[in-house]
Image: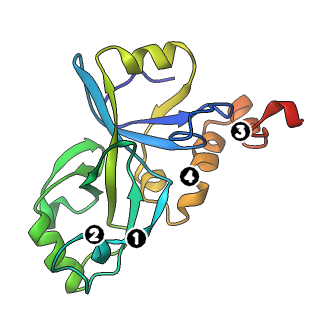
Amino acid sequence: MADAAPGILLISDPFLKDRNFMRTVVLICEHQKEGSFGFVLNKALKQDLGDLIENADDIHFPVFEGGPVQKNTLHFIHQRPDLIGGVEVEDGIYWGGDFEAVLTLLRENKLDKNDIRFFLGYSGWGEGQLDGELEEKSWITRIASRQLVFQMNTKQIWKAALEDLGGEYSQMINYPIDPQLN
């Protein structure tokens, strides 16, 4: 298991009951003494980018719920620093960049769903909070990979992240959400 750091995936424990994070995978983009910040990768919203951005109603592109914090903010991660810049979080995974360039490239069909992901809101932890959750075993950690982060079938990210770890982790994908139902 990896320590909390940028580029780490937090895979929720199969029995985690928090509605915001049940069966989710969170990409950590920033981790400092003061707190941590990331995005839930596998909770698609019904709205698309055109529904959320003024003057972008011509852009029909999926948006994900990044987490329960500041749900009125839009964020993005991508694999195209050559076109839009950004901060490298992990090998080939970038956070942020030139949003106006993003809109232009989307209109010109020069970015696709493999290149970029949008999030409404984010997941955040205060000082020491995430470390405490890791000690409680609420999360399983691993280093992010572009294949997982930008997986086309986002409903399978949680299972794929565990399967890739192998051993006892690959068995967890079959655990019921409520062990009392077993």
Secondary element at image label 3: helix
N-terminal label among 3 and 4: 4
N-terminal label among 4 and 1: 1
N-terminal label among 2 and 4: 2
Q: Residue tagged by mark 2?
A: 52
Mark 3, other Cα within 10 Å: few <14 / some 14–19 / many ≥20: some
Task: Mark 2 vs mark 4: give the one in front.
Answer: 2
Q: Residue tagged by mark 3?
A: 170
| Marks 3 and 2 in Cβ contact (< 8 Å) | no
Position of residue 36 relative to residue 115, above or below, is: above
Identity, as a three-letter code, of the amino acid under mark 3? Ser
N-terminal label among 2 and 1: 1
Q: Mark 2 to mark 4: distance in Å?
A: 25 Å
N-terminal label among 1 and 3: 1
Residue drawn 67% across the image and 34% down it: 14
Identity, as a three-letter code, of the amino acid under mark 1? Gln
Q: Position of residue 165 (x, y in %)?
A: 61, 36
Q: Position of residue 78 (x, y in %)?
A: 28, 58
| Marks 2 and 1 in Cβ contact (< 8 Å) | yes
The colour scheme of the drawn protein is rainbow
Q: Which mark is residue 47?
A: 1
Secondary element at image label 4: helix
Q: Which mark is residue 157?
A: 4
Q: Nearer the viewer, residue 24 or 140?
A: 24
Secondary element at image label 2: helix
Q: Quadrant of the C terminus?
A: top right
Q: Position of residue 25 (x, y in %)?
A: 50, 43
N-terminal label among 3 and 2: 2
Identity, as a three-letter code, of the amino acid under mark 2? Leu
